[in-house]
Structure formats: structure tokens, C-alpha cells
Amino acid sequence: MKTAENATSGAGLAWCKSSYSGAEGGQCVEVAADPNAVLVRDSKDSAGSALSLGPKAWVEFVKRAARG
């Protein structure tokens, strides 16, 4: 797991906001995929750092998140 320099390293990517994110703000995340990684960032701080996960790490993250 790596931290991208900042979210601008994901410039030109399509960022998708979590469907669990409400209109009132709060705890929201966005993800974007490039050929080598999935980037995750705080939607309230799109200029901040993004977490970069390789394909295997992303699959493991989603599996564990689904279990709660």
C-alpha cells in the first residue's frame, strides 16, 4: 500500500464517490482506477493525498470491507 504524492497524481482519472456518501457531507471516499492501481481519497479533500492500492491489495480490501 502506498500513498500517492497527492490527488493530482490521479488527474485525468474518473473519480467515483461512494454510494453510501450522503448529500450532507461527512465521511465520504472516492476511488479511481488506473492500469496499475486503485486510488482512494477523501472526497472533502480532493487536493490532498490519495491512497494507492495495487490490484491484489484492492481485492483484499473490498473483501474485508464487505465482511464489516
Image: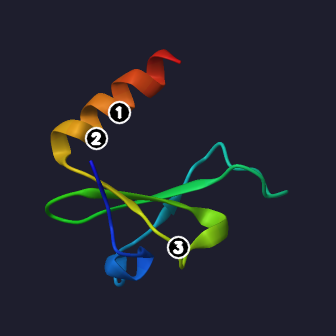
The residue under label 2 is: 58
Residue at the location (40% across, 82% down)?
A: 8
Q: How would you rate the neighbour count of disc 3 (Cα within 10 Å): few for under 14, some for 14-19, many for 20 or more? A: some
Residue 56, percent from left and from top? 17, 37
The secondary element bearing badge 3 is classed as loop
Residue 58, percent from left and from top? 28, 41
The secondary element bearing badge 1 is classed as helix
The first of marks 3 and 2 along the sequence is: 3
Using the image, determine if residue 14 lies above or below residue 29.
below
Instruction: Tell whether 62 sits left or right of 26.
Output: left
The first of marks 3 and 1 along the sequence is: 3
Q: Amino acid at mark 2?
A: Trp
The residue under label 1 is: 61
Residue 11, percent from left and from top? 36, 83
The secondary element bearing badge 2 is classed as helix
The residue under label 3 is: 48
**Image marks 3 and 2: residues in contact by CB distance under 8 Å:** no
Residue 6, percent from left and from top? 41, 76
Which numbered mark, 3 or 1, is in the foreground of this view? 3
Spatial distance from mark 3 to mark 1, Cα to Cα?
A: 21 Å
**Image marks 1 and 2: residues in contact by CB distance under 8 Å:** yes
Spatial distance from mark 3 to mark 2, Cα to Cα?
A: 20 Å
Spatial distance from mark 1 to mark 2, Cα to Cα?
A: 5 Å
| Among the 4 quarters of the image, the one containing residue 23 | bottom right
Q: Amino acid at mark 3?
A: Gly
